[in-house]
Image: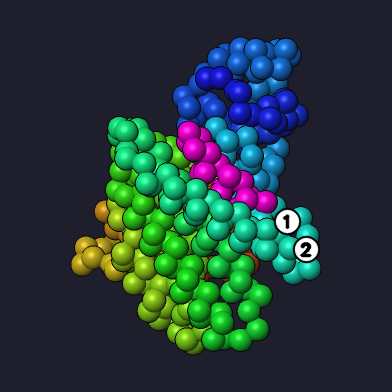
Amino acid sequence: MSYPRMRRTSELLRGQRMALSILTYVHEKTPEEVVDDVEAETGTKPSLTTLWRMLKGVRTRPVFGLEEIEVRETFYTSSGIAVLALLEELSLRTTDRNTGSDPRALRPKLIRALKVLRELKRRLRRDRSVPVKDEADRSERRVDEAAIASLGQQICLYRVRFADSDHKKRRWARASLSCCNRGLNSIGEAGVLGSSAEPGDRILAARITVNGLFGSFVLDRLNRDCAELTGTRAFARRYGQFSMLSAAFFCGRATHDPRLPHYFAELAALLPHPAMAVSLNADVTIERPALHPVETAARLLFISKKLDGHQETPIRDWWPDWLSERLPQLESAIQLIEQAEQRHRRAA
């Protein structure tokens, strides 16, 4: 792997744990190969001990598991559209986090993001006028389209937050779901199926889905349907396929971000329950979807807790600082984890 596009490679040596996780897991690089690549790019050869500490050390708090170095490497396309769109989205999220969601800081960023979005859409339309050269070109265009949809979706969700009436909130929430549908349709099933799928496709599909889940929840809340969550359940049924849930496990492992599997646990908990009963002895440590959605939700919750550095913390005592509320529909999954914890204590 070369690093011509990584302007911040040197930051990898200063504790960018997420960057190293992406390189070693998604791109299947060994620590030794990362050492050689970093030395070739920066002239500095880090020790394997340094790399190991970066992987196992104190976790940074990247914005939804991605920082600039990962965006540039994982979502590279020859047009550059996907990277520009996702870096703009990253800028919005970073400003939101660093300013405590201050509207005065976010509004100028939103104005800039809208200009970038319009320009990228123009570039995409221009690219579409040129015939597709081959399957690789088709795949890159698909990623470009999905990245533009992801940026548009994020802008809409911020506009929901700043809207001064329920009517406007509904309008922007619906617009965010339209972006979600376009993004997931652009990626298609190829983006989330199987271990041979492109990592960027799977990560992008999972992130768009989580934002779609949030948009659906906002609409249900505006419609005062917080108990049944009719719209959110419909969204879960539409996009909660085995392939998408598999992508959620993959993205959790690849980015070491506990938030995404937690939100997917909520999606799984809202899926229709089959007639079969969930096993009371379910193994919640397995990192793949189960046949029963409650068991899948429990597995996703467990990996989220593990990635948050609380594998040994009882599930009832774990409430991460990034979680504002937890759906009551997760109760059955939490009980499964509790039973697994009790078995673990008895065996110790």
Q: Is residue 11 magenta?
A: no
Q: Nearer the viewer, residue 42 or 135?
A: 135
Residue highlighted by disc 2: 105
Give the percent coordinates (x, y) of residue 314: 57, 54
Give the percent coordinates (x, y) of residue 41: 66, 17
Give the percent coordinates (x, y) of residue 118: 55, 58
Q: Are marks 2 and 1 in contact (CB under 8 Å)?
A: yes
In the rendered image, the vertical position of residue 13 relative to residue 118, given as above or below:
above
Quadrant of res 235: bottom left
Q: CA distance from mark 2 to mark 1?
A: 7 Å
Question: Residue at coordinates 25% horizontally, 63% vertically from top-left?
Answer: 277
Q: Label 2's element?
A: helix
Query: Do we see residue 202 in this rendering?
Result: no
Query: 81 left or right of 12?
Result: left
| Amino acid at the residue labelled 1 | Thr
Give the percent coordinates (x, y) of residue 58: 70, 37
Query: Do we see residue 79 in this rendering?
Result: yes
In the rendered image, the vertical position of residue 119 relative to residue 169, given as above or below:
above
Q: Earlier in the sequence, mark 2 or mark 1?
A: 1
Q: Which residues are magenta?
A: 76-91
* SS assignment for the magenta stretch, majority: helix
Residue occupying the far left of the picture: 275
Query: 147 left or right of 233?
Result: right
Q: Label 1's element?
A: helix
| Amino acid at the residue labelled 2 | Ala
Residue highlighted by disc 1: 95
